[in-house]
């Protein structure tokens, strides 16, 4: 009886519960919940993978949206779009500062460029055919221990282009 009582008392200590989020596939790089400076670094890192594209322009007309456009002078483009939310951050002097943080990111590119970008972010070796086959499915992922959702779908308005999106679950 004594051993049963000890076992029952020690059970909560011995059991380490795992959440569903711990089993999500981890992606290599995202800028979710990051600042504009991290977004700029991310764009440079991603565009280094896709040869021949050069910066065309940056659209910051809306304070909560930044769009980075890249062109390869062959009528093909890559667009990286980031939607921000405003968070209040407490400073060391106990004041609050408002900060823009990425809440949604969306990458639009033609299929071969999207395949390179997808393979880099997810650390896979998919072919363009495989990218087309996995489209339309939501995929839960993890980055820095945080759960996010991602989708890859064909662009209904631009034939041959694909949209890869990331957002919080």
Image (cartoon, rainbow, N blue to C red):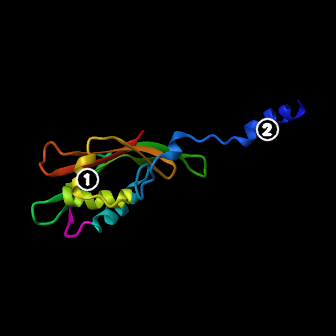
**Element type where label 2 sits in the image:** helix
**Mark 1 sits on what residue?**
130
Where's residue 20, x and y in %?
52, 40
Where's residue 127, x and y in %?
25, 59
Q: Quadrant of the N terminus?
A: top right
Q: Residue at x 40, y 54 (%)?
A: 31
Q: Is residue 6 left or right of residue 133?
A: right
Q: Quadrant of residue 73?
A: bottom left
Q: Nearer the viewer, residue 21 or 156?
A: 21
Q: Can you tell which mark lies on residue 7?
A: none
**Mark 2 sits on what residue?**
10
Q: Which region of the structure is painted magenta? A: 50-57
Q: Residues within 10 Å of mark 1 (few under 14, many from 20)?
A: few
Q: Residue at x 26, y 53 (%)?
A: 130
In the depicted structure, whether residue 49 falls above or below residue 167: below
First in sequence: mark 2 vs mark 1? 2
């Amino acid at each position: 009886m004594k051993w049963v009582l000890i076992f029952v008392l020690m059970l909560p200590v011995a059991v380490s519960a795992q959440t569903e989020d711990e089993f999500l596939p981890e992606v290599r790089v995202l800028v979710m919940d990051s600042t504009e400076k991290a977004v700029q670094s991310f764009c440079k890192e991603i565009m280094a993978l896709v040869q021949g594209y050069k910066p065309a322009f940056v659209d910051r007309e809306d304070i909560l949206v930044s769009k980075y456009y890249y062109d390869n002078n062959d009528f093909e483009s890559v667009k990286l779009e980031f939607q921000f939310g405003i968070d209040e951050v407490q400073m060391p002097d106990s004041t609050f500062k408002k900060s823009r943080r990425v809440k949604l990111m969306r990458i639009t590119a033609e299929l071969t460029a999207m395949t390179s970008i997808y393979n880099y972010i997810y650390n896979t070796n998919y072919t363009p055919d495989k990218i087309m086959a996995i489209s339309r499915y939501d995929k839960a992922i993890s980055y820095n221990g945080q759960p996010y959702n991602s989708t890859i779908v064909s662009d209904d308005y631009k034939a041959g282009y694909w949209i890869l999106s990331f957002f919080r679950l």
